[in-house]
C-alpha cells in the first residue's frame, strides 16, 4: 500500500527523499493529509487525534512505514428518501413522451 501511495504521488509530481518512513510523511503532506502516525502514537494520542479529525483533518495510521488505516471525521449516512415526498408539487404533461417532429427529422427517422 505504501508503494501505491508513493507511486500515485510520484505521478502527481512528488519527489521524495530520505528513508521510506520519511517519504510516507512527505507523501501525506504532498497529497493534503496532515500527518502520518504510528499505531503506538495513535494509541497514546487517540483523544487528540479525534479532536483533529473533528476539525476536518485526516490522519494516516501506519505500522512501521506502511500505511494501514486512515482516521477521518464521521459522516452520518444520509436519510433514506421517502416515496411520494413530492406528490402534488410537480406535474408531468400528458404529452411528455409524444414524438417531436424536429428531433425525428434531425435523427433521420422522419422525412
Image (cartoon, rainbow, N blue to C red):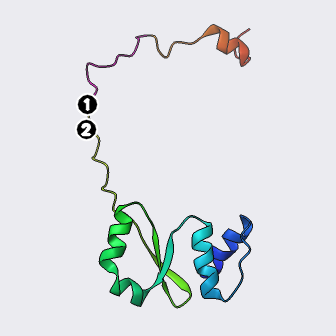
Residue positioned 49% across, 17% down in the render? 97
Residue positioned 34% across, 57% down in the render? 75
In the image, which disc is placed on residue 95? none
Residues at circles 1 and 2 in contact by the CB criterion of under 8 Å: yes
Callout 2: SS = loop
What span is colored magenta in the figure? 85-94
Q: Is residue 26 above or below residue 110?
A: below
Q: Looking at the picture, how far across and down is residue 102, in whole percent? A: 66, 9
Label 2 belongs to which residue?
A: 82
Residue positioned 72% across, 15% down in the render? 106
Viewed as shown, does residue 73 lie left or right of 17?
left
Q: Residues within 10 Å of mark 1 (few under 14, many from 20)?
A: few
Work out whether residue 71 can be spotted. Answer: yes
Looking at this view, is 44 or 70 the one in front?
Answer: 44
Viewed as shown, does residue 30 lie left or right of 61?
right
Q: Is residue 6 above or below residue 97?
A: below
Q: Residues within 10 Å of mark 2 (few under 14, many from 20)?
A: few
Q: Looking at the picture, how far across and down is residue 59, in whole percent? A: 45, 72
**Quadrant that contains the C terminus:** top right
Label 1 belongs to which residue?
A: 85
Amino acid at each position: 500500500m505504501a508503494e501505491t501511495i508513493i507511486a500515485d504521488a510520484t505521478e502527481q509530481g512528488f519527489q521524495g527523499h530520505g528513508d521510506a518512513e520519511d517519504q510516507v510523511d512527505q507523501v501525506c503532506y504532498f497529497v493534503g493529509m496532515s500527518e502520518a502516525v504510528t499505531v503506538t502514537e495513535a494509541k497514546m494520542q487517540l483523544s487528540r487525534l479525534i479532536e483533529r479529525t473533528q476539525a476536518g483533518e485526516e490522519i494516516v495510521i501506519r505500522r512501521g512505514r506502511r500505511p494501514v488505516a486512515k482516521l477521518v471525521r464521521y459522516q452520518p449516512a444520509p436519510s433514506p428518501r421517502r416515496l411520494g415526498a413530492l406528490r402534488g408539487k410537480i406535474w408531468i404533461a400528458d404529452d411528455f413522451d409524444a414524438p417531436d417532429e424536429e428531433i425525428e427529422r434531425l435523427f433521420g427517422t422522419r422525412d
